Amino acid sequence: MSTVIDELGARLKTYEGRAAAVAGRGKDPVNEPMIRHWCEAMGDTNPAYTGPDAIAPPTMLQAWTMGGLSGHTGRTGRTGAHDELFDLLDEAGCTSVVATDCEQEYLRPLRPGDEVTFDAVIESVSDRKTTKLGTGYFVTTRMDVRVGPDLVGTHRFRILKYAPARPKGKPEGKPEEKRARARRPRPVVNRDNAGFWEGVERHRLLIQRCTHCGTLRHPWLPGCNACGGPDWDTVEASGEGTVYSYVVMHHPPFPAFTESDDAAGAAGPYAVGLIELAEGVRIVSNVVGLPYDKVRIGLPVRLEFRRYDDDGEDAALVLPVFRVQEGREGEAG
Ligand code: ZN
C-alpha cells in the first residue's frame, strides 16, 4: 500500500455531514393504490397490507419520498450539495455510477393518510477504492423519514461513483500478468440435489418424477409441487429441447462463463438459456455453438456434457449444456 495524497478525496470528505435535502415532502400521502401496486409487483400477499387497518409494506419507505419520472416540483428540499459532490466526481473522471447497497430501519409502520417529509444527509465518502468496475469513491447518503415530528424510518443508500476501468489490453502501471483462466463456480451439492449431480457426472440428465402422481420436476426438490408427495424416482432426459427464454449477461463480467473459444478469453457477454426439455421441464443452462447475440426463443437445441477447468489443478467440472443443432440456427419461433 502506498500513501498517495488524494486531493480530490480530501475535498470530497468536506461533504460528509452536509445536508442533501431539507424538509423534502412526499409527492403523495401514503395511499392504498400505491400499496396495492407494490404488493402486486412484489407478489406479496401479506394480509397486513390490505383492509381497513392496512399498513404500508415497510420496504416501501423510499417510495414515499421519490420524485418519480418528472421529479419533485416546487419546494423540493434539495440543497445542491449532492449535485456539487457529483460534479466534482464527474470532473475528476468518475463519470459512472452504480448503486451498491441500501439499509433501511423502520421505527413505526406507515399507514394510508400519513404525510411524509424527509431530510437527507451525505453521511460518508469513502477513501479512494479500486473495484473491478473501476476506481472511485463510495458515497453514503442517509435519509430520515418523518411523519409530523416523528422519525418513522431511515434509508441509507450507498453508491460507487467511479472512473470505468481501462479498456482491456492497456495496462495501467504494473505489467499485465498472465491471467489464469477463471474457474467456474462449483455447484452447491446437498441431499436434495446430489442425485442430479451424480447423474451429470455420468453424462445423464436425470429428471425427478413423483412416484405418487407422476409429475416431473426440475430443479430437484424434496417434494412434489403437484401433490406434495415425498417419494420420487427419476427419468433420463432424451436431450432434445428448445430455448424457452434467455437473457444476455453483459455486466458484471464473469470470465468463467465466457466460452474459451471466444476472443482472447475476454469476459464478454454470454447468453443464459432457459431450456425446455422434450419432457416438459425447464433447466437453466448455457447455449453453445453460436454467438450470444444469435440465441433466440424457439431454437432447437440438444444436450451435451462439457468438462470445464480440466487443467489438473482440481477436479474438472462436468456441466450439461445445450448445443444449437447444426443447420437449424434459423428455426426460432
Ligand atoms: Zn406428485
Image (cartoon, rainbow, N blue to C red):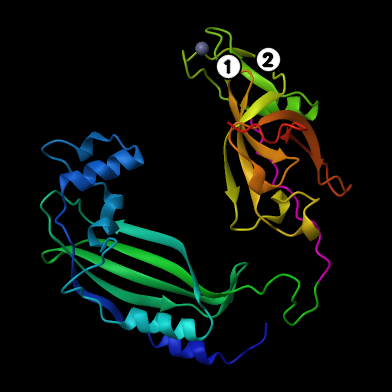
Identify whether 235 is placed above or below 17.
above
Q: Which residues are magenta?
A: 177-190
Front-most of residues 290 and 224: 290
Identify the residue shown where x is 72% and y is 34%.
324
Magenta span contains residue 285 = no
Query: Which x, y percent locates residue 218?
Result: 59, 25
Residue 44 quadrant: top left
- Note whether ligand 1 is within 8 Å of mark 1: no
Q: Which residue is mark 2?
A: 235
Q: Can the viewer see residue 106?
A: no
Secondary structure type for disc 2? strand
Q: Are the two marked residues, 1 and 2, in contact with CB atoms closer than 8 angstroms?
A: yes
Label ID, residue 190: none
Q: Amino acid at mark 2?
A: Val
Query: Which x, y percent locates residue 225?
Result: 48, 19
Identify whether 75 is placed above or below 246.
below
Q: Main secondary structure of the magenta part?
A: loop
